[in-house]
């Protein structure tokens, strides 16, 4: 439908809507609409803590959430008082609420917004894991399946992609992020937005760029904490993926929880109106984060919730996610002349436009009971989940034990996480089902060559208990190979899951050191939401290999088995730096040089008790084969401002296996008016090479991409010397110098 056509319809609707109906469109509700359940106070936040701290089981938590949803009140929907739902993902309930909306005077369908972060029912790897594939086709494959499943179940709005650059592994939400690099994150943003929103066989699916802005920079890595970053850093590091999402036409943006340089994002006019709409030309609507409108009171900038509603709407925050403050206070605010009807109209206009544009008006609900069981978690989707997961794993260490050799006849799988379906599924997967997860033991057992026996012994888990060590060691001694699954459970990362200690939780490190002391080879399979400080495993010769698998989702065990047995060759590369110690966080590759770059002399920038280099740098990842880089060339040694620089390098597979390599191109502006990063990623490509095969990788970079934000925040290209690097990660590669001239 054409924009003009839609606008006419929107204006017509606006002209016949009552104020209450308009405010209803700005009111998003969810489980918080339930005040009390029989015998239990509805305290969802409290239940989450109870579950995470083991006071109630996951089953009990789900039961209570289910009861909440049972209690859905439809009168408010029928009165036009609700415009959208957050995280309603029970297909039948979605159907019911849309039916209620169809009984309302204007029959405006509801937005059903859900956190479709990593698939819908078929759960794929976490977003951080996905980013390690550096593979846009991989993303498209995942998104298309998520879109199909979500749409068939009635979901018409997804709260993703999460585009927060994350440089601090203490922050639990690093697991949801696209990593630490703005260029890679921007590529991901564009890919995800296009895949969700393009008009394909399933129509369009509205998506949300979140959380605007710089949520990843929370002080101390502590979730929801204050953020204080310079304008230059905002433009250079945190804004680019949002700019890319807006350029790709993202339909909605979610404002973030925190205060940015003193002003909560939810009620920041300079952020939501001046920057997002004024400068970035964002055309869609803004939704707050959950209950963030009322949190402006706790932030200390609104005197009460009425004030918070007024400030947020006036700042440009169109929809109130679950505070209910818009529906409670906007009528009176308009009545008293404190909020203008035109500002309400403006917000409603944006929301209605999206409802038309994304097909919700034409097709109130896509709920198709007949299709759900054939579609969700079908064989085809599971195969995709397995293959996508394989591309997300990163091989961190391998002294030759992997792929598993034919001589291995008896494998011991150990570590509680190997059997922990919820952990393998990982965080942000509540639309999935842990029963759909293939455990590590099952995966290895089902995919092992015939004649290989596989035994599981729990041995240890993420707790401090060492009671299983003795049995584990006895069994390990009788095996040809030990596969120890170590890392984090699902709730150790994600929202409200920040940590100051990034070591392997509980007694896991101790268990690993005991296993490493045996003469039997031992492999560590890491399951984690974030980079962990695993230097002791890296440096211990008794640990033959470390495979970072993150949280792979429903096909975990199968994907891991394919990687371990060499059915596929690991190709992922890190998109976040691994520090040696948590105290080094935030640690990231694209930092300025300082005046005293870390070295062997005393008065240099470093720590006394940890190496200045990371444990694993950004871009790092091994393969079962080896790649040699040679013959780097640039098209020009002197470049003019309107020119394009062409660079190329030859990459050869010098090993024994076919494999994929992610070739990375970085620049460094040697001298500029502001200190520039030691390296900045500018391009990358992924190539597949058979043993002995070589390919030329070429990159084209326009001179305008050599610029940066100066102190006054204007983007400028400065002439002078630049170093161009092409290599396998951010710490290696060949380098050539070029000069940019007027
Ligand atoms: C809070 C999270 O910050 C946000 O990412 C999510 O979309 C909403 N809750 C809804 O679940």
Image (cartoon, rainbow, N blue to C red):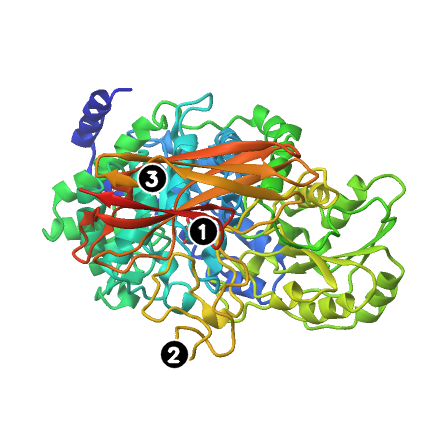
Q: Residue at x 35, y 28 (%)?
A: 358
The residue labelled by disc 3 is 245
- Which x, y percent locates residue 35? 43, 57
Mark 3 neighbour density, 10 Å: few (under 14) some (14–19) many (20 or more): many
Mark 2 neighbour density, 10 Å: few (under 14) some (14–19) many (20 or more): few
Counting residues from the start of the chain, the first of labels 2 and 1 encountered is 1
Q: Do the residues labelled 3 and 1 touch (CB within 8 Å)?
A: no
Looking at the rendered structure, the secondary structure element under dot 3 is helix
Looking at the rendered structure, the secondary structure element under dot 2 is loop
Q: How many circles with numbers are drawn on the protein?
A: 3
Along the viewing direction, whichever of 465 and 36 lies nearer the viewer: 465
Q: The N terminus appears in which quarter of the rendering?
A: top left
Counting residues from the start of the chain, the first of labels 3 and 2 encountered is 3
The residue labelled by disc 2 is 603
The residue labelled by disc 1 is 179
Q: Do the residues labelled 2 and 1 touch (CB within 8 Å)?
A: no
């Amino acid at each position: 439908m054409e924009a003009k056509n839609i606008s006419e319809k929107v204006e017509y609707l606006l002209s016949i809507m009552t104020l209450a109906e308009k405010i209803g469109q700005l009111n998003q509700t969810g489980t918080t609409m339930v005040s009390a359940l029989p015998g239990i106070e509805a305290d969802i936040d409290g239940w989450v803590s109870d579950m995470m701290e083991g006071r109630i089981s996951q089953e009990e938590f789900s039961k209570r959430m289910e009861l909440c949803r049972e209690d859905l009140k439809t009168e408010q929907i029928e009165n036009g008082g609700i415009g959208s739902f957050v995280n309603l993902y029970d297909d039948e309930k979605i159907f019911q609420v849309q039916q209620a909306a169809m009984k309302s005077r204007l029959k405006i369908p509801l937005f059903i917004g859900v956190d479709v972060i990593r698939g819908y029912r078929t759960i794929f790897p976490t977003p951080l894991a996905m980013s390690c594939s550096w593979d846009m086709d991989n993303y498209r494959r995942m998104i298309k399946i998520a879109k199909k499943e979500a749409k068939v179940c009635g979901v018409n709005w997804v709260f993703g992609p999460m585009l927060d650059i994350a440089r601090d592994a203490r922050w639990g939400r690093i697991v949801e992020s696209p990593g630490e690099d703005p260029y890679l994150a921007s590529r991901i943003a564009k890919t995800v937005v296009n895949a969700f929103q393009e008009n394909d066989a399933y129509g369009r699916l509205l998506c949300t760029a979140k959380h605007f802005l710089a949520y990843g920079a929370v002080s101390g890595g502590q979730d929801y904490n204050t953020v204080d970053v310079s304008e230059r850093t905002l433009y250079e590091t945190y804004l680019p993926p949002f700019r890319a999402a807006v350029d790709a036409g993202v339909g909605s943006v979610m404002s973030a929880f925190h205060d940015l340089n003193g002003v909560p994002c939810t009620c920041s006019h300079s952020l939501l109106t001046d920057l997002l709409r004024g400068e970035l030309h964002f055309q869609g609507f803004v939704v707050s984060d959950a209950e963030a409108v009322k949190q402006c009171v706790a932030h200390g900038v609104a005197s009460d919730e009425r004030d918070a509603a007024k400030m947020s709407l006036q700042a440009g925050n169109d929809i109130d996610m679950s505070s209910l403050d818009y529906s409670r206070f906007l009528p009176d605010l308009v009545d008293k002349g404190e909020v203008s009807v035109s500002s309400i109209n403006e917000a409603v206009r944006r929301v209605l436009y999206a409802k038309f544009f994304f097909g919700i008006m034409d097709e109130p609900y896509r709920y198709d009971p007949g299709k759900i069981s054939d579609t969700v978690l079908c064989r085809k989707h599971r195969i995709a989940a397995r293959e996508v997961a394989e591309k997300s794993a990163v091989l961190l260490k391998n002294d030759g034990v992997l792929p598993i050799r034919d001589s291995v006849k008896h494998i011991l799988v150990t570590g509680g996480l190997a059997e922990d379906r919820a952990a393998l599924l990982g965080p942000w997967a509540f639309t999935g089902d842990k029963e759909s997860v293939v455990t590590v033991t099952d995966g290895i057992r089902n995919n092992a060559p015939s004649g290989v026996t596989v035994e599981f012994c729990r041995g240890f888990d993420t707790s401090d208990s060492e009671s299983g060590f003795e049995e584990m060691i006895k069994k390990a001694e009788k095996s040809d190979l030990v596969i120890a699954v170590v890392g984090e459970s699902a709730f150790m990362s994600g929202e409200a899951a920040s940590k100051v200690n990034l070591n392997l939780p509980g007694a896991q490190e101790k268990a690993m050191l005991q296993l490493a002391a045996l003469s039997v080879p031992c492999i560590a399979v890491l399951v984690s939401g974030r980079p962990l400080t695993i230097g002791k495993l890296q440096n211990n010769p008794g640990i033959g290999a470390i495979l970072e698998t993150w949280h792979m989702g429903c096909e975990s065990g199968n994907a891991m088995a394919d990687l371990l047995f060499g059915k596929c060759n690991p190709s992922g590369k890190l998109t976040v730096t691994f520090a040696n110690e948590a105290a080094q966080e935030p640690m990231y590759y694209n930092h300025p040089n300082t005046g005293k770059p870390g070295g062997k002399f005393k008065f240099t920038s470093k720590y006394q008790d940890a190496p200045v280099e990371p444990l694993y740098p950004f871009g790092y990842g091994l393969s079962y084969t080896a790649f040699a880089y040679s013959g780097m060339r640039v098209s020009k040694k002197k470049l003019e401002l309107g020119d394009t620089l062409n660079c190329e390098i030859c990459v050869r597979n010098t090993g024994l296996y076919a494999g994929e390599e992610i070739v990375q191109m970085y620049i460094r502006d040697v001298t500029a008016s502001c200190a520039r990063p030691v390296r900045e990623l500018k391009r990358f490509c992924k190539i597949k090479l058979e043993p002995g095969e070589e390919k030329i990788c070429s990159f084209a970079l326009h001179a305008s991409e050599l610029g940066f934000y100066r102190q006054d925040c204007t983007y400028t290209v400065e002439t002078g010397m630049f170093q161009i690097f092409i290599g396998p990660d951010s710490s290696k590669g060949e380098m050539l110098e070029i000069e940019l001239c007027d």
